[in-house]
Image (cartoon, rainbow, N blue to C red):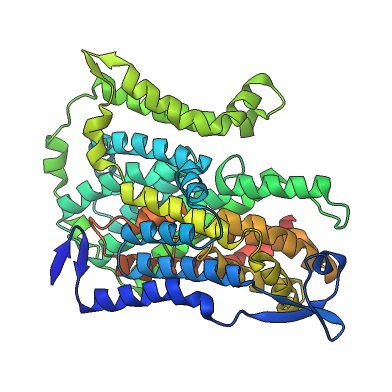
Amino acid sequence: MKVFGRWEFNSIGLLNTLIGISIMLFGRFAPPPSIVVPASEKLLNLGLPQVDGGVLLSITPMGMAMISLFVGVVYLWTAVDTLWPSFLGVLLLGMSGYMSMPQVLGKFMGNPMVVMIFFLFIFAAVLIKSNLSAYLAHWFMTRKIVQGKPWAFTGTILLATYCVAFFEQTSACFLMWPALYIIFDHAGFKKGDKYVSVMIVYTMVMALLCFATDPVKGGAFYLLSNMDNLAASSSDIAIVPINYAKYLFFGVCVSLVCIAAMLFAMRFIFRIDVSPIKNINMADIEKDELPPMSIQQKIIILLFVFYAAWLLLPGIIGRDNIIGDFLAKNALGGTLLVTFILSFVHIGKKPIADIVETNSAYPWRTLFLIATAFLLGGSMTGQGTNVTLFMEYLLRDYLSGLNGVMLTVAVIVIGILVTNFFNSVVAGLVLTPVLLAICQAFQLDASPVIVCFFYIVLVAAATPAASPFAAILYDNTQWVAKKDVAFHAVLASAIVVCVLIVTGIPLARFLF
């Protein structure tokens, strides 16, 4: 076995590499799926061939090329490595004829969301290097309510991560994970232990649950805002906007049940050994007092709160005032401002954080993975592929005849599958008008269906391309192997699906 960087090159790695590259190169030659759908002015204007009183809707050859690129890269990310497949995918996209190489490179690193995440990761690296996690870990381990109670301790960690994520979801795990590593060391856990793998995955799932809950920023905000825009602009479909307060209540209730279900599964189904936590020597920890926080550490905490407030305030005070409007319009610049302050303000002739020094903790692999996922996902569902249109009519065909409850169940299952192969927010934006049209065609109340769909489509962690959260998770190989990430992320997704079906659907039908 030879090791190149972090990629272990062996026979299995070679086989998976050949499979992934073959999908990328030759998948485009697979016969495109086709369906016959009723003719409409929209479809006839696309020049689709008419057959049997309808039109033949197929994914285009370019669509097949984009699908094969995307699927091949996701396969390589999951089975081989998270870095070089990104570069190969971008290179092949530039050679595909879908767009020119300068356009590809411009969209690759020029996407505003990617630029925002670039600066956010600089701040995340500063958080990691600031040693604030040591204070957080010390605080958790010295709480009397959890000492000697491993399951109370575990539940506290998960609930705390969910709450912290309301400030800023993407960076929440960069704050919580280092604290967990310190706790693992104190308890004597090592990489590969089931408790370690599950906790690394579940803390990220907590951030995703918050991402799906929070209606004032992040994924839920984007989808709810899109729903408002559709309600205001659509003349064909009667759309009722979703009440944000009710959605927040719905999301919090479902999330709390999910946390309880995950703890139950850890304890009674997976039977995870938590005895090392009970054996942590609290006397030594309490004796080993940490020094007072430095001015730099305190400023970093204030900047974290400042950035969180920047994102939160427009949703709280509204956008019909000068402050809310300014913060909302410049939300993507918040991380740039924080990075500027960190490098500009000097204390004792040194900046608050030396970006060059903290660069060693920068998650470069994750950044390139996210940028590639945005690029390839957008290309796959872009103009000239017919992928989105094909999905719309396929779902209409397969979901016809279902009642409200069964339609919601089907949408939840479809949502968790689709979101793990598309970007989660993109999948939500693309499928929302499709589901609204289906509900109107079947004369069903759309609100409960849409609410459950929004929640599940944002809990995307099973593949690296599913969301920025999943990309961060798959790149964390310090304490957990990628195969364990995939296994526990899929199980966590299944738990969320079950909770949403059992408790979320009745609650949504009651509230909406």
Taking 100 as reference, is 463 above or below it? below
Taking 185 as reference, is 7 above or below it? below
Q: Is residue 10 left or right of residue 488?
A: left
Pick out the residue farthest to the top. Answer: 348
Q: Is residue 39 visible?
A: yes
Between 221 and 8, the residue placed more toward the observer is 8
Residue 136: % across, % down: 29, 38
Residue drawn at point x = 44 percent, y = 31 percent:
335
Q: Quadrant of the N terminus?
A: bottom left
Q: Is residue 136 left or right of residue 45?
A: left
Q: Is residue 86 left or right of residue 432?
A: left
Between 197 and 249, the residue placed more toward the observer is 197
Residue drawn at point x = 48 percent, y = 32 percent:
308
Q: Is residue 453 left or right of residue 397?
A: left
Between 26 and 290, the residue placed more toward the observer is 26
Residue 160 figure quarter: top left
Q: Is residue 454 visible?
A: no
Residue 416: % across, % down: 55, 67
Residue 482 figure quarter: bottom left
Residue 197: % across, % down: 29, 63
Between 392 and 402, the residue placed more toward the observer is 392
Taking 301 as reference, is 422 above or below it? below
Q: Quadrant of the C terminus?
A: bottom right
Residue 122 figure quarter: top left
Residue drawn at point x = 25 percent, y = 42 percent:
361
